[in-house]
Image: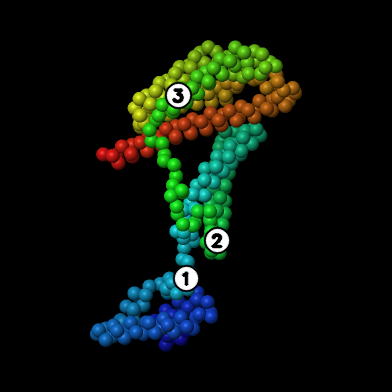
Amino acid sequence: MTTTDTLTDRYIDAAMRTVPEAQRDDLAAELRGSIDDQIEARIADGADPESAERAVLTDLGDPDVLAAGYTGRQLHLIGPRYYLDWWRLLKLLLWIVLPCVAFGVALGQVLSGATIGEVIGSAVVAVLTAALHIAFWVTLVFVVLERTGHETMTSGPWTPERLPEPRQRGAGLGDMITSIGFLLVMAGVILWDHFIGLVPTQRGLPFLDDGLWPWWIMALFLVMAMEAVLAIAVYGVGRWTVALAVANGILNLIIAVPALWLLAEGRLINPDFFPSIIEGADGETVQTIIVTIVGFVIVGVAIWDTTDAALKAARSRRAAHALD
């Protein structure tokens, strides 16, 4: 470029840098002609040549954007045609993979004798790493699909068959019966475990520690009765409310926190259960694995049930406001 190059020359040169060489001369000539016509029109309206040129180029905007319009080149990573498919798949994989990664890493750390800080630290690092990999590779796949023109499973024309099922807002009789039935089954399993045992070949061998009887188990039955009352209250109101969701979360904490403490103290699961049915060191290994899994199940169920009730309460509240 020489010192005599005008703003128009520089603009055309910048715009043509990303244009395929076979199209470059024709598009450059077309663009120059368009710029010259607009400059002449402004000069005819009384503008001086320098101001007219600057105004025309300003109106044309970024030369790279203009060139992309000429050649049909996309200036986005993932466009609207593929965006929803990308976002839905990304969310699905994150919901499925990240909990599995956290569980697997934490279980391995616990079995290796790591401290609680090491378990949490390793799990957090593994989850963040997995999330970055999932986001990168899913995005890369969709970039390739879009650039090569391939279709995804839902990138075709939209049809009513794609409509999702309506989300549950209320609480029906079936929900109440299911909740109470589950509580009754759990109470029956606890009683069966204490008086008969869960292993046919080892009658009287309880899975839960005998030291939980009677006070800890009675306290658990009391909280389970409160859970049943809560299920009846939700059915009576007809929907989850914020107050009922908070009460549900408190009940989950009342169950989960003592259970985790007892589990950590070795007072929740009968320490002789697995060594009695599995000979040698394998029994102790299985016991350690099951104790760890039970801990994760307790935390997972509490979080899931609390979150589910909170989301239903939020949806019910939004629906009520929409009707007002």
Residue 64, x across and y down, in percent: 45, 72
Q: Give the mark toward the camera: 2 or 1.
A: 2
> Residue at image x 37%, y 24%?
233
For this orientation, the residue located farthest to the left is 46
Viewed as shown, does residue 35 lie left or right of 220? left
User: Is there any visible trace of residue 60 in the rendered image?
Assistant: yes
Between 216 and 151, which is closer to the camera in this rendering? 151
Q: Secondary structure at mark 1?
A: loop
Q: Quadrant of residue 248?
A: top left
Viewed as shown, does residue 7 lie left or right of 110? left
> Residue at image x 44%, y 34%?
308
Mark 2, other Cα within 10 Å: few <14 / some 14–19 / many ≥20: few
**Mark identifier at residue 293:** none
Q: Which residue is mark 3?
A: 177
Q: Earlier in the sequence, mark 3 or mark 2?
A: 2
Viewed as shown, does residue 221 lie left or right of 317? right
Q: Secondary structure at mark 2?
A: loop
Q: Could you tell me which quadrant the C terminus lies in?
A: top left
Kindly identify the amino acid type of the residue bearing the numbered disc 2: His
Disc 2/disc 1 C-alpha distance (Å): 17 Å
> Residue at image x 49%, y 57%?
156
Q: Which residue is mark 2?
A: 150
Q: Which residue is mark 1?
A: 72
Q: Give the mark toward the camera: 3 or 1.
A: 3
